[in-house]
Image (cartoon, helix red, strand yellow):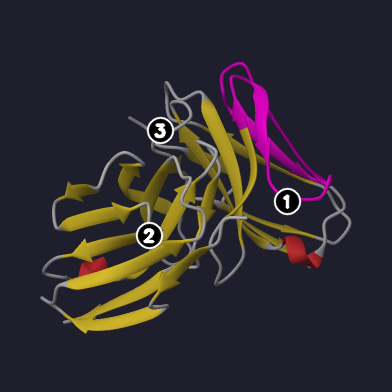
């Protein structure tokens, strides 16, 4: 059974800092990994999708890496802003459709 | 283009009642998945439908059922509601397997 763990559970940083969110998974036989952002009480916004054959993906200030053999992914956020405050969720797919989610990292960026 | 839409936004039901939640995928997307998210946890996979057929089912009791219509919209039905069914129910759509999944805003279900 796939287990997804996200560390840290919560993080508070001052505006402008670069930061790294971590995700680990126990079963490396994945099809893809997706990072999401969730604002309180809202749905999920897809940030980045990494296929199993890829090592990283970039979108604006976000960069996600994937090391399938070690069961790890990181989400790097450059020059953080207060608007980045949200919960960030990592999800992996072993089936091609069902996503297994971690519990998320709650990020607070203070002005 | 419109994103994934879900209705209703909020719902309050009593234990033992039945509920139907609705989802419309992004135009051109043929796959719809349902997830349950309880407070403080990541979403849990319930069902996936592709081309109107059930492709996968998570570890949920038979009280949960779903279907997909010819226009690719979907319904999630929950019978005999329990207090523990209170959660945010999320619908996601994608073009097909292995593709990026896009989530709707969710339906907040409260069971009293």
Tell whether A78 sits left or right of B96: left
N-term mark: 1 or 3: 1
Q: Is residue A18 above or below residue A33?
A: below
Q: Can residue A45 be seen at all in this image of the molecule?
A: yes
Which residue lies under the disc numbered 3?
B99
Task: Please name which of the two marks, 2 or 3, marks the residue nearer to the observer.
Answer: 2
For this rendering, which residue is in front, B94 or B20? B94
Q: Position of residue A22 (x, y in %)?
A: 34, 68
Q: Against A26, is A32 above or below?
A: above
In the drawing, does residue A48 fall left or right of residue B77?
left
List x then y, in percent, for residue A73.
33, 59
Q: In the drawing, what numbered circle is on residue A70?
A: 2
Label 1, secondary structure: give it.
Answer: loop
How far is disc 2 from disc 1 in space, using C-alphas? 27 Å
What residue does disc 1 label?
Answer: B59
Above or below, comparing residue A48 to residue A72 in the picture: above
Describe the element under mark 2 as helix, strand or loop: loop
Q: Are marks 1 and 3 in contact (CB under 8 Å)?
A: no
Q: Position of residue A95 (x, y in %)?
A: 55, 38
Part of the protein shown in magenta: B49-78
């Amino acid at each position: 059974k796939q287990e997804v763990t996200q560390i840290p559970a919560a993080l508070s940083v001052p505006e402008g800092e670069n930061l790294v969110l971590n995700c680990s998974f126990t079963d490396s036989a994945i099809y893809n990994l997706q990072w999401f952002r969730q604002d309180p009480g809202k749905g999920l916004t897809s940030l980045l999708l990494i296929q199993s054959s890829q090592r990283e993906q970039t979108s604006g200030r976000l960069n996600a890496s994937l090391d399938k053999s070690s069961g790890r992914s990181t989400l790097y956020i450059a020059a953080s802003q207060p608007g980045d405050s949200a919960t960030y969720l990592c999800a992996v797919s072993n089936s091609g459709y069902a996503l297994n989610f971690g519990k998320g990292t709650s990020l607070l960026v203070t002005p | 283009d419109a994103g994934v839409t879900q209705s209703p936004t909020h719902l309050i039901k009593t234990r033992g009642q039945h509920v139907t939640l609705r989802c419309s995928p992004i135009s051109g997307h043929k796959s719809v998945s349902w997830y349950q998210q309880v407070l403080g946890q990541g979403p849990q996979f319930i069902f996936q439908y592709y081309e109107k057929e059930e492709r996968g089912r998570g570890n949920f009791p038979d009280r949960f059922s779903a279907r997909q219509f010819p226009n690719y919209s979907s319904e999630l039905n929950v019978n005999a509601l329990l207090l523990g069914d209170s959660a945010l129910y999320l619908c996601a759509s994608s073009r097909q397997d292995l593709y990026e999944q896009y989530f709707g805003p969710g339906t907040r279900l409260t069971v009293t």
